[in-house]
Image: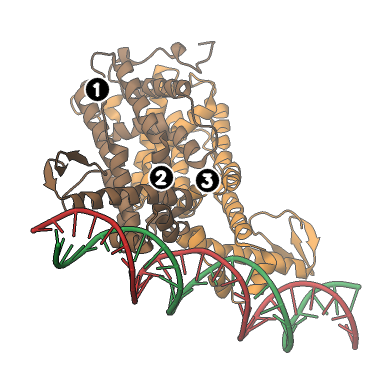
Chain colours: A brown, B orange, C red, D green
Amino acid sequence: MPFFESSYLAKGGEWYHIGGMKIGKRESQRLLKRAQIIAIAREHFFEKGFEGASMSAIAAQLGGSKRTLWSYFPSKEELFAAVVEDTAAGIRGGIDFSAVGDSPLDQLTHLSRTIIERMTAPIAVQMFRLISPMSERNPELVRIFFERGPRRTQKSIAEYLRANFGDLLWTDDYWQAGDDLVALAASNFHFESLWGLSNPPTPKQKDARARRAAILFLRAYGRHPELWAPIDKVDGARETV
Amino acid sequence: MPFFESSYLAKGGEWYHIGGMKIGKRESQRLLKRAQIIAIAREHFFEKGFEGASMSAIAAQLGGSKRTLWSYFPSKEELFAAVVEDTAAGIRGGIDFSAVGDSPLDQLTHLSRTIIERMTAPIAVQMFRLISPMSERNPELVRIFFERGPRRTQKSIAEYLRANFGDLLWTDDYWQAGDDLVALAASNFHFESLWGLSNPPTPKQKDARARRAAILFLRAYGRHPELWAPIDKVDGARETV
DNA sequence: CCTTTGAGGTACTATGCAGTACCGTTTAAA
DNA sequence: TTTAAACGGTACTGCATAGTACCTCAAAGG
């Protein structure tokens, strides 16, 4: 079976193509059905968790018989693994941190905003909820999720910082700096979303948080004083400063 | 039934006491057994999750009959809730952020170290794993956990910052500042522990991370330049600065 | 001392689950 | 057109589970 990325298929004339390769109709239908199963299973796993989700219920929603489901995924574990891999690929997709030309503060604000958006996206939140309890029972799966999802985002951020802020920070450890930026930008929202403690943040709140994270980051890591935002310009600063 | 805190009982002479109140032996034994059940149930829930854990298995490990278990907790949900409440109380217990007399940097380092210790403690990590997937199915329970556990720690940190750093920071929002300190100190370790991605951090690593978080925090939030650690003294700084 | 209460033991009910067997029908590939 | 595979439907097998019934025994409380 050829490599394929997150259930993407295209039909061209007589034949069905996938990633430029020509395949039979039978196989292409199998891939489509596979993707459909994963989508349905994802809903169930997200809502009920691994133990709570039922293969029978998934098969029922799929429409066909149980035999069909089992012919694609020989066990619940393998179906779950497929969901995790597919979702991790979906989460990392489409990273563009390009905000060339703006000031360092604006660039970092934009980056922080992207990070926040990504970490509070429903699919990410639900994936976090789903994957956390697996670390005791299936550590390898958690590792796969991390490598294919968050790890790549981490890497992109570190590379972005190295490329665009190489001379502006006092550290060479761009991975650590990136982690700190992520922490400053998303930590609050992450826990609030994960635990459903408050209504999802509005775009305005996300903007404000992103800007604040950028300011804090530049003050903490900025090499030159001109990078440090004046503290009386920051939201939450005392009036008496 | 009188209020009692995280399975604490003391025997004094003829009578059994709890929080200064005199109670019968029968009742005290019930409380002891209750605490014992919670302890056993906690293990099971931590290892297998809510759906994965089995009341029968818990009853078996308890030793008695199932009837006994059900006479204490009329359903699996209520037992789970009791475990959550008890554990949340245990997590927050014993907060002492008193490091009077040291320099601001040393105080913040000590505070960060405490935060790290608390967030990477096995009981906290396992509780996070257990509680995350509950937010869809039992949001109220997650709320209770948060209010009785992390929320109180948050509050302690904010109050500590207000009391000891009231004049040193440029912000009045001590809750936000506290959250940012927590993020800087524990975010990395939190995810690594939660997902079991690497070996638990050594005390040395925790010390280093705590110090770094304190430095970053003071540079980001410090009101006066003398609070900002020289950047060539920080681990990970470039040699060429 | 006697009564009430709780706990142990065992067997039970009802339910839901993952996974299988069988068989007739559809359908893609040759 | 033929053929082999995949699909749909239904019924099934074990198995584990939450929770119940019932009886016996120990012990706390008055």
Looking at marks 2 and 1 on the same chain, the residue that comes earlier in the sequence is marked by 1
Mark drawn on residue A98: 1
Q: Amino acid at mark 1?
A: Ser
Q: Which residue is mark 2?
A: A128
Q: Specify few, some or many for label 1: CA neighbours under 10 Å numbering under 14, 14-19, or 20 or more.
A: few
Q: Amino acid at mark 3?
A: Ser
The residues tagged by marks 2 and 3 sit, at their Cα atoms, a distance apart of 12 Å
Q: Is residue A136 left or right of residue B177?
A: left
Q: Amino acid at mark 2?
A: Phe
Q: Which residue is mark 3?
A: B135
Residue A173 seen:
no
Decide: marks 2, 1 in contact (CB < 8 A)? no
Residue A187 seen:
yes
The residues tagged by marks 2 and 1 sit, at their Cα atoms, a distance apart of 27 Å
D16 vs B119: above or below? below
Residue B225 in picture, x, y percent from top left: 39, 17
